[in-house]
Image: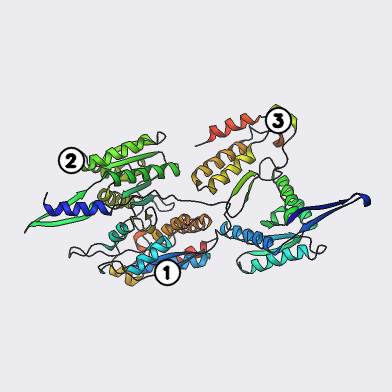
């Protein structure tokens, strides 16, 4: 899905136009990536999120591409869910979801919702990958750079980026280091003594970092 | 030294080629296209080889692993590994094999050794560890033996000086010693291991093993976070059977490595369960960890009672090498569950099961 910046603003009519573009090429490759990810990581189910009852052609094309790719992975369950029902299901019964593949905008919203119910955007890891490059960053809300007060008091939560950097270490083929980092971070969280404000604690970023370093094996 | 030895030595030096070190890898967020099936050369081999490689084929099929095998028939009595097999391995870069039986004497050289030399698989690795549910005399054993695979006593440089007198040359080079030491320390670094122990007999073979030790010491300086020590091989064998928990990663020249690896495998549960492989800069050949030349007794072959666990775990190492960590984990978990339950064990582990029964149990336990 390309958000074209071919927006037209017809001032005379007080009209703003936005164009949403879905291509078979991009839908196919994201569907392939989702199923390949599920296959390589022993995931059982892929759910496509869409609004094809309304956007019949655009999201319809997206769904078609997902269905075609699904046929090549008979061992993985495939289903579809309309995005509004999806948001409701996420907050009611999130255990039903496994891997979710979505176009651009829905993905932004679904990712942030899922991150929120599972613990907050301060702890979820993630990244962006293409055929040749990978950029790792905080899983959800990459555009959210926090309030000034958090910056001033150095109370930002480093966990999300630490876990993303563990993903990066795996991507660079250093699994042992990735394991050590993740184990240390998970121990610090589970002990509960050292948490930043978004997790209900009072610690500063540096205190969390020191705790993680102390727990490294 | 006779003139013939000199020529043989020159040939050896010419055949060594520069190579860099192979690393193992795990992918979590895969690159697009990582799930495409990979070709792996399969050599069933002699004796129990076909039985255990068939076990691996069945389990891979059950897991829908993204690999497919190109099978080739090679027997230990052949004089050389066929050219088409070598080509296949060079193309695929990864090979899985059962054992190839080496005839004693007779002048036919070991095909196992020939493969390692031609592909320059300079490092042989065996992981000897206690499997839960398989009690042995010692606990907390987790030893990785890294053995130089191309020179030393296996240089194959033997000749009859005069009738009744045979000379066998053991060749140790700085080049090979350095690269195996580098591999051992890099392995320890990448796998969070704390200690590397060099095994030698430099009190007797002062120049040969002395050169080996020098190379290890130089490389050790670059890894200040890893403890390095040395042990004479006879004391090492005794320590292995008395207190094996003290060892972590062990780096050895060719012959000692063979013996140390088999001893360590034996104390930790037997050569029927220890995984391992051979790796070089460009290729990797996975096989049963220790005793690759031991293809079992005829009775075991007839009754189909060979232990497939070693090759199954080696194929899990191979899956990681090919960057399919999730499949490797599933396979290892299933195998470990079967062993720990104790119901399905082959004769070498004290049970009565056939190879097929173990395979079926593993497939049943796959998630």
Residues indicated by labels 1 and 2 sit on the same polypeptide chain: yes
Q: Residue furthest left?
A: B163
**How far, Cα to Cα, is label 2 from label 3?**
66 Å
Q: Is residue B337 left or right of residue B234?
A: right
Asked if one can make out residue B184 in the rendered structure from this viewpoint, the answer is: yes
Q: On residue A143, which mark appears?
A: none
**How far, Cα to Cα, is label 1 from label 2?**
46 Å
Please count the marks in the image: 3
Q: Is residue A29 left or right of residue B271?
A: right
Q: Residues within 10 Å of mark 3 (few under 14, many from 20)?
A: few
Label 3 sits on a secondary structure element that is: helix
Q: Quadrant of residue B117?
A: bottom left
Mark nearest the camera among 1 and 2 is 1
Which x, y percent locates residue B120?
33, 55
- Which chain is mark 2 on? B
Residues at discs 1 and 2 in contact (Cβ within 8 Å): no
Quadrant for the N terminus of chain A in the image: bottom right
Determine which residue is flagged by label 3.
A151
Asked if one can make out residue B52 in the rendered structure from this viewpoint, the answer is: no
- Which chain is mark 1 on? B
Identify which residue is drawn at 49% across, 44% down: A176
Q: On residue B70, which mark appears?
A: 1
Q: On residue B204, which mark appears?
A: 2
């Amino acid at each position: 899905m390309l958000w074209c910046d071919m927006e037209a603003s017809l001032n005379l009519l007080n009209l703003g136009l936005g164009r949403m573009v879905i291509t078979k090429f991009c839908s196919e490759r994201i569907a392939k990536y989702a199923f390949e990810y599920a296959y390589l990581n022993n995931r059982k189910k892929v759910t496509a999120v869409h609004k094809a009852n309304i956007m019949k052609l655009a999201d319809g094309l997206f769904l078609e591409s997902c269905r075609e790719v699904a046929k090549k992975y008979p061992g993985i369950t495939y289903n579809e869910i309309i995005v509004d029902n999806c948001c409701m299901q996420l907050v009611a019964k999130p255990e039903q979801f496994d891997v979710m593949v979505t176009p651009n905008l829905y993905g932004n919203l679904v990712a942030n919702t899922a991150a929120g119910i599972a613990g907050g955007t301060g702890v979820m890891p993630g990244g962006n990958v293409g055929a040749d490059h990978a950029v790792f960053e905080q899983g959800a809300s990459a555009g959210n750079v926090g309030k000034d007060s958090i910056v001033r008091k150095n109370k930002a939560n480093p966990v999300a980026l630490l876990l993303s950097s563990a993903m990066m270490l795996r991507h660079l083929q250093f699994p042992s280091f990735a394991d050590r980092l993740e184990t240390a971070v998970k121990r610090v969280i589970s002990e509960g003594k050292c948490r930043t404000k978004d997790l209900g604690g009072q610690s500063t970023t540096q205190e969390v970092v020191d705790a993680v370093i102390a727990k490294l094996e | 030294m006779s003139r013939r030895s000199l020529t043989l030595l020159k040939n050896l030096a010419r055949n060594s080629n520069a190579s860099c070190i192979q690393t193992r890898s795990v992918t979590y967020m895969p690159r697009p296209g990582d799930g495409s099936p990979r070709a792996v050369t399969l050599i069933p081999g002699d004796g129990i080889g076909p039985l255990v490689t068939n076990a691996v084929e069945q389990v891979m099929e059950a897991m829908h692993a993204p690999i497919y095998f190109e099978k080739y028939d090679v027997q230990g009595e052949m004089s050389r590994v066929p050219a088409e097999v070598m080509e296949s391995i060079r193309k695929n870069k990864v090979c899985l094999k059962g054992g190839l039986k080496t005839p004693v004497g007779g002048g036919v050289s070991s095909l196992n050794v020939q493969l390692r030399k031609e592909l320059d698989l300079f490092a042989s690795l065996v992981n000897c560890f206690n499997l839960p549910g398989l009690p042995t005399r010692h606990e907390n054993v987790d030893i990785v033996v890294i053995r130089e695979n191309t020179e030393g006593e296996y240089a194959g440089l033997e000749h009859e000086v005069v009738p009744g007198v045979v000379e066998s040359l053991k060749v140790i080079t700085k080049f090979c010693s350095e690269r195996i030491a580098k591999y051992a320390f890099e392995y320890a670094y990448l796998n969070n291991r704390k200690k590397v122990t060099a095994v030698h007999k430099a009190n007797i073979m002062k120049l040969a093993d002395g050169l080996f030790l020098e190379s290890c010491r130089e490389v050790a300086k670059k890894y200040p976070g890893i403890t390095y020590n040395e042990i004479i091989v006879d004391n090492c064998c005794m320590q292995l059977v008395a207190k094996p928990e003290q060892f972590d990663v062990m780096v050895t020249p060719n012959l000692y490595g063979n013996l140390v690896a088999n001893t360590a495998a034996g104390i930790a549960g037997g050569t029927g369960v220890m995984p391992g492989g051979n790796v070089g800069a460009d290729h990797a050949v996975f096989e049963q960890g220790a005793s690759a030349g031991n293809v079992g007794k005829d009775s075991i072959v007839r009754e189909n009672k060979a232990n497939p666990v070693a090759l199954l775990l080696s194929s899990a190492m191979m899956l990681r090498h090919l960057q399919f960590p999730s499949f490797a984990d599933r396979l290892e978990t299933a195998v470990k569950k079967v062993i720990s339950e104790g119901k399905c064990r082959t004769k070498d582990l004290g049970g009565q099961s056939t190879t097929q029964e173990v395979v079926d149990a593993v497939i049943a336990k796959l998630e």
